[in-house]
Image (cartoon, coloured by chain):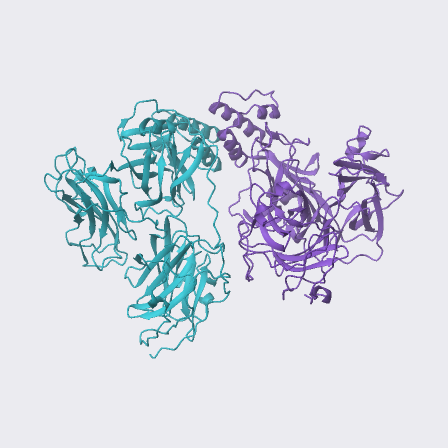
Chain colours: A cyan, B purple
Amino acid sequence: MQVPSPSMREAASMYGTAVAVFLVILVAALQSSAPPESPFPYRISLDPEGSLELSWNVSYTQETIYFQLLVQELKAGVLFGMSDRGELENADLVVLWTDGDNAYFGDAWSDQWGQIHLDSQQDYQLLQVQRTPEGLCLLFKRPFGTCDPKDYLIEDGTVHLVYGILEEPFGSLEAINTSGLQTGLQRVQLLKPNISVPALPSDMHSMEIHTPDILIPGQKTTYWCHITELPDGFSRHHIVMYEPIVTKGNEALVHHMEVFQCTAQFESFPQFSGPCDSKMKPDHLNYCRHVLAAWALGAKAFYYPEEAGLAFGGPGSSRYLRLEVHYHNPLKIQGRRDSSGIRLYYTATLRRFDAGIMELGLVYTPVMAIPPQETAFVLTGYCTDKCTQLALPPSGIHIFASQLHTHLTGRKVVTVLARDGREREVVNRDDHYSPHFQEIRMLKKIVSVQPGDVLITSCTYNTGDRKLATVGGFGILEEMCVNYVHYYPQTQLELCKSAVDPGFLQKYFHLVNRFNEEEVCTCPQASVPKQFASVPWNSFSRDVLRALYGFAPISMHCNKSSAVRFQGEWNRQPLPKIISKLEEPTPRCPASRVQSPTSPTVVSIGRSKS
Amino acid sequence: MQVPSPSMREAASMYGTAVAVFLVILVAALQSSAPPESPFPYRISLDPEGSLELSWNVSYTQETIYFQLLVQELKAGVLFGMSDRGELENADLVVLWTDGDNAYFGDAWSDQWGQIHLDSQQDYQLLQVQRTPEGLCLLFKRPFGTCDPKDYLIEDGTVHLVYGILEEPFGSLEAINTSGLQTGLQRVQLLKPNISVPALPSDMHSMEIHTPDILIPGQKTTYWCHITELPDGFSRHHIVMYEPIVTKGNEALVHHMEVFQCTAQFESFPQFSGPCDSKMKPDHLNYCRHVLAAWALGAKAFYYPEEAGLAFGGPGSSRYLRLEVHYHNPLKIQGRRDSSGIRLYYTATLRRFDAGIMELGLVYTPVMAIPPQETAFVLTGYCTDKCTQLALPPSGIHIFASQLHTHLTGRKVVTVLARDGREREVVNRDDHYSPHFQEIRMLKKIVSVQPGDVLITSCTYNTGDRKLATVGGFGILEEMCVNYVHYYPQTQLELCKSAVDPGFLQKYFHLVNRFNEEEVCTCPQASVPKQFASVPWNSFSRDVLRALYGFAPISMHCNKSSAVRFQGEWNRQPLPKIISKLEEPTPRCPASRVQSPTSPTVVSIGRSKS
C-alpha cells in the first residue's frame, strides 16, 4: 500500500461561497491508516441529476471501504448510507447537517418510521472535508462489518445505497425524518473483486456495438433493442475483454446493457432500432439470446482470464448481434440523445481455451411454485453429481464469473458447490439481490468444479404483494432461479438444472385435499398452474409444499442445449444428500477498534457570506 | 447509587505467600462507575469443593454485572465464564494466567476444540485484584450484551457458568486448552429481578421443614424424600415467604429442594425419610405433589406479593408434607451429614388474596411427540381465549412467579401472552433452560391476564441422542412442556393446556404412509406411541409433523382439577390466530463503550518466594 498523495494530506482550504449555507473545514486529520493505492477506482452517480457523485475504494487487508462523496451544490446537508433493499427506513446512514450555526458529521441510523438517530457507536470515520471547484468533497471510511446491530453489514454482492438531500437546517439530528426529504437509491457492487488485469494480446482489435445516436424516450423505463452485424466473412475470434461506452451526460440514465448473438438457425435478421416492447419489433429478435457481453451500472471493464476467451464469428455462428440498453429515466427527462453501448476487444489469435456459459438452477416449469404472501420462500435447483460426472472433463472446469437471474420476486440467490456430500464453497452469493441489477460479476476466486461435484442454486422470493401462487416459467410474472456461470474450458453441458418430480407434486395436491375441503382438482387433465391457483394457502399447505421440495425426487435437465439431454435416466432422481452445510458467515468485527466518539464529530464552521 | 466503600478504592496490598506461584497487584483503578449499593447480594460456589466462590450484583441502569470471584487457593490461574449450556468449548471466558514471569487478565473465548483465544474486544473489565486472608479476590464487571459475536449475551433465565483451574503456567493464552484442565459448570440465574422486599406481617411465624440430620449418600445424584406433618389442628394460614436452610459446608451439594403438600384424599401418610427411588418408599408419596415451596441453587428467599399468600392448613387440606432434596455429589463425597430444608414464614392473618398455581403448556399425552435426532424441535401448548374468558374473573389475574418444567430433552421454554391476536408480552422465558435447574422465579414485572387472553407456552427439545420419537407423558423418558405460574387471586382454573387433535394426528400417519412405504400402522387399535415408533423419520415426515402441530385443531384441557373440565366444547378447537408476534429481543450494545484494549490487561507482578 502506498502513502497517500500529498494533496490528500493537506489540511482543507476554505472557500467562501454564496451558494452554500455553511462552510465546513477540516475536522479530522487523516488517520495513520491511509487509503490504499489508486485513490478511488470506482465511481457512480447516486441521483439522476448526477449532483451526488460517489467514488470508493476497497482495502481488503483493512476490511474497510474508503468513500469519497462529492456534493455538487450543497444545501443544508446530505445523508448517505445503505439499507437492506434501498429503503430510507431502517437504513445505516452518515449525515452531514447543520442547525444553522454549526455543522456536524455523524454516523446515524433511521428507524422504521424514517426518523434519524445518532448511532451509539460511530463507525463511519470522517477523514477529510474539502471545498473543491466541483463541490464539497467528503472523505470517510467504514469497516465492512462493525458489530453494531444498527449498522449495515457490507457483504459481497449487491449493496443498496441510499441518499437524501437536506434543503434546510434542522435543530437536531432527531428532527430529521427521511420521509420529508428528496431521497433515492442506487444499486452497486461495493466489494469489487481485487483481481489484477490479465495481460492483453498485442493483436487485439476492438469494435463498438452502440445505439445510433437515438433519442432516449421521456419515460421511466425503456429497454432499447438495436440490431447490428459482424463484418461479412468475420472469422472465429476470441473476445478477451469488453467495456461500457456511456455517452457523456447520460451516466445516470444508462442502467444496463447487454450484447446478444442471434441464433445461427436463421440466415438473416431484419434491421431494427427501437424499444424492445415496440409492436414494430420483429419476432426474430427473440432468437437473439446468446450472451456475448453484459454490463450494469457501476461495473467496469470485464476481462476474460488469460487462458480463455469467448468465441464469436466464423462458420456456424450468426453474424447478427442484438444490443439491449436499459434506460432508467425516473425524472422523465426529454430530448436527451444517446449512443451508449459496449466496446468488444477481441483477438484472432485464439487463446488456449474457449470460455463457455452454463445455466444452473431451476428448470422453467410450473411445478416449482411459490405460495403467495411469502416474504422469504426458498426454491432450490440442483446440478447433480451424476450429471457433472457424465458431462465434465476429468480435469474439471473453472468458473470465473457469474450472473444471477430471477424475475420480479427474487430477493437472494446463492450457488454452493458440494463434494462428497459436503458443501465446500460458495460459487456466488447475493443476499441483497435485485432483479433490477443483474450484472455479470467476476468471482473473487476461480471455483473449480470436478466431475461428481454437486452445484446447488437457491433463490429466495418475496411474494408479499401476490394473491395467487407464482409458478415457474418464462413470463415476467412467473419466476426463474438461474445462475449463468462463465467458465472454461467450454464443454457440451449447457444446462444443469432440476425441478421436483411431477408425480410427487400430485401426491402433494391429494394431501392438501385430505387436510382441507377437496379444493384442488387432482384430475389428470388439470394444468399445474390451475392446480396451484386452487390451493387453499394456509400454514399447512405452505409448510408441506416446502417439505415436499426438500424431500421429493427431482427431474434433471442435464442438457447439451435446451432440447438435447445427455444420455441416461434423469427422472425421479434422488435429491443430493448434503451431510454438512457451509456455516453462515459470521460478521467479523473490526480487529482493532478505534476509539469511537459517541457524539457527532466536532464541527467548527465559518458562517457563509450570503 | 453510593460511592464505593474506601476499602474497595485502596490500592491492593501485596502479600508474600509460599503457596501462590505469583502475586498479582492492583492492575486497574476502580472506574468512575462504581458497583451499586449493596456490594454483592448473590453468592454461589462454582466447584464442588467450594474453593471458587462467585458473588455478583446487577446494575440494571448500567446493564452491567459486577462479579467478585474469590479463589481460595490460587495455583497458576483460573478461568471463569459462560457458555450456551455449560460446555467449555465455544465459551466466553475471562482468564487469569501466568507465563511464569508475568500474570495477565484477559477477556478470552474458547473455540469448538476448547482452545483459548484472546478476544479482539475486551469486555470484561478488571476493577481490582486483591489478596485477602480467604484467597485471591478478583473484581470485574461486564455489560449484559457486548455486540461482540464471540461474547455470551447475558439474558433473563438460566446462565451456565463455567470455570477451570490452571495448575501450571502457560507460555501463552493460546497454549491453553480447556480439555486439559479441571473444569466444571454451575447453573444460576444471574439477572435476578430487582424487586424490593414486600412488608412482612408482624404476627409472622416460621417453621422449618428439613431432613433429620441424614447421611448424604456417596453417589452422584440423590433425591431425598422426607415426610413431615403440620401440627395437629393447624388452621388455615398464608405462607408469605420462605427461604432455604442449607447445612453449613454442604452449599455445593444441595442442588434443589421442594416442599409438597399431600392430597387430602388420604387420611394419613406413612413416615418415610430416604432416597425417593428407594424400593422402601411408600406408594402413597406419589400423591404429595401440590407445591408449597421450591428452591434451587443460587436462589434466595421467595416473597409473596404483599396482597397475597399461599394458603395451607385448615380443613380440607392434608397435614402431610413431603420435602424433596436433590443432592448433587459428583465427587461422591462420603459421610457428610445434612439437615437442609426450607423455612416457611406464615401468618394467621390471611392476606387479601389467596395465591394460586396454574399449569400452562401441553397435556401429558403421546399425541405430542418429538422426532429423534432433532436439535431444536418446538412443541407449543395453548391456554385459549375461550378458556380464560370462562374461567378468569372480570378483573383478571396477576402472575408474579413462574416455574418452567420439562423432562430430560428440554432446552428452552417460553410463555407469551397474546391479546386480540397480538403477542403482547413475555410471561417467562428461558433460552438456556435446563431440566436440572427448575427453580421458581419471581417475574421482573407482574403480568396481568384478562379474560379472553391467550397464553402460549413453547418448549424447545434436543433429541439428538434418541433413536426413536419421544412422546409426551409422565415418564422421565417421555416429555412435558409446562409452566407453573403463581398468581392471585386464586381461581378454579388449575390446568389450561392443549394437545393436537388425535384425528388429525391419524391423518398425519396416513399421509406419511402415502409418501413412504406404508410403515405406520393406521389401524384403530394401534397405540400412538407404537405408531410414532414406526414412522420413518426423513425430512418430509419431520417437516410435516411440524406443519401439523402448527395447523391442526387442538383439544383443550380447561380444568378445575386434573380430572374436572369446565363446561363447554373443548375438542377440535381452532388454534389461536396470532397476527403479530413479539420481536426477538435484539442485543443492545453497551451505550457508551469504554475504550477497550485489544491486549490483555497489564500485569506487573512480583515473583513468589517459593
Q: In which quadrant of the rendered view does residue B465 lie?
A: top right
Locate residue B74 relative to residue B518 in the image: left or right: right
Q: In which quadrant of the rendered view does residue B33 lie?
A: bottom right
Q: Residue furthest front?
A: B610
Locate residue B472 relative to residue A75 in the image: left or right: right
Q: In which quadrant of the rendered view does residue B253 lie?
A: top right
Q: Position of residue B510 (x, y in %)?
A: 51, 24
* Nearer the observer, B22 or B388: B22
* Nearer the observer, B40 or B10: B10
Q: Is residue A185 visible?
A: yes
Image height check: is A236 above or below A242?
A: above
Image height check: is A400 above or below A88?
A: above
> Which residue is rendered at x = 31% and y = 76% of the image?
A18
Q: Position of residue B455 (x, y in %)?
A: 61, 44
> Which residue is rendered at x = 29% and y = 64% of the image?
A51
Locate residue A560 relative to residue B335 in the image: left or right: left
